[in-house]
Image (cartoon, rainbow, N blue to C red):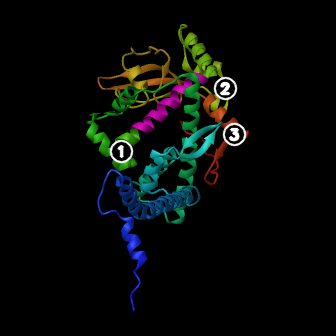
Amino acid sequence: MKKLPFKRHKEAKKEIPSRITNETVAEHREQILAGGRRFKYPMQYARHKLVFNTIIVTFVTLVLIVLVGWWQLYLVQNTNSFLYRITRVLPLPVASVDGEAVRYSTYLMYLNSSMHYLQQSEQVNLGSDDGKRQLEYYKRKNMDNAIADGYAEKLAHQLGITISEQDVTNAVNQQLVTSNGKISQETYDASTLSVLGWAPDEYRQAIKNKLLQKQVAYAIDTNAKKRADQAATMIAAPDADFTKIAAALGGDGALKVSVGTSGMVPSTNNDGGLSEAAAPLQKGQFSHIIKTTTGDGYYFVRLLDKSDTQINYQYLRIPLTAFNEQLAALKKSGKIHEYISIPAVENQTIKQ
């Protein structure tokens, strides 16, 4: 019996020309491309799926990181160095004052310094009942200080007040002068790190914050400036007397004008610039108006006595009150919002 030819095999062979000619080159090209598509499209579909899955995993991971970070900072109130570094990079808020965000990093910078001082210098066990009580006190105090810094920044933007790095350097140089002479920058850095736990960039930031608060407090307290001008006029009169001037200016509580004496102190005493202003005076001579580096008021000094290295002066202080009064008013009107829970501390005032 004669076998039938395998037509399908023959037809398949006929589909592939044995020679490439001008007439068959397009057919050859299409056959080669068709063979490649079998490998291209499955890989293309797999790659799209891989990218999609990677995006989903990345998004879920970021959400988890944000949630864990929020939990650690705002509920647990973790103060470890890793989270502190995160708050220094990311402008996370710990509170707001009159619409101005208060940076979490500022609060942690102050709080970690207080904790370092309690543990290293005072040998306080923060896990004990007394340690917990002190820690709650410093949490409240440092939150108030951070809020005051935030409000000072808000007012500084409105008033066009800025603090340059040179201003900070000048303030640091003043602190290098002690009653025993001038210390080196390296000694000051080591001392600040040992006592407060601050690196140079941190204590410079703290000094900058306080300088800004001081400049803002002087700028907004028109009442204190008016009283200081009145005191200057009275001091220019014959037989001027600080006690009589203080009584004439009056004031109760925080507004009260005060008079005091320094006693014999080094002429380079670190007292906000009062000794520096008194040292060139003659006995009985009054100074001009002084804005101290502490920023707590306007001062006048009268030299009582002096030696080669020491001086004794009397001072008249006209306090600044507007800054704290405005903060208190904002708190009373509900314009200060804190994003972490800190117990209130009785008789706690905002320190400038």
Check disc 3 and report the residue beneath it: 335
Q: What element carries label 3?
A: loop
| Residue in front for this viewpoint, 275 or 210 | 210
| Residue in front for this viewpoint, 297 or 145 | 145
Dot 3 or dot 2: first in sequence order is: 2
Q: Distance between the residues labelled 1 and 3?
A: 33 Å
Question: Can residue 258 be seen?
Answer: no
Q: In this view, does 41 lie above or below 207?
A: below
Residue 244 percent across, percent down from the top left: 60, 18
Q: Does the magenta stretch include residue 214?
A: yes
| Residue count near mark 3 (Cα–Cα under 10 Å), binned few <14, some 14–19, many ≥20 | some
Quadrant of the snapshot with the N terminus: bottom left
Dot 1 or dot 3: first in sequence order is: 1
* The magenta segment: 204-220
Check disc 1 and report the residue beneath it: 199
Q: What residue type is labelled 1?
A: Ala
Q: Is the magenta stretch mostly helix, strand or loop?
A: helix
| Residue in front for this viewpoint, 282 or 14 | 14
Observer-side mark, 2 or 1, equals 1
Left/right of residue 305 with respect to residue 250 in the rendered view: left
- Identify which residue is drawn at 39% across, 80% down: 5
Q: What element carries label 1?
A: loop
Give the residue at the far bottom of this rendering. 1
> In the rendered image, which quarter is residue 327 located in?
top right
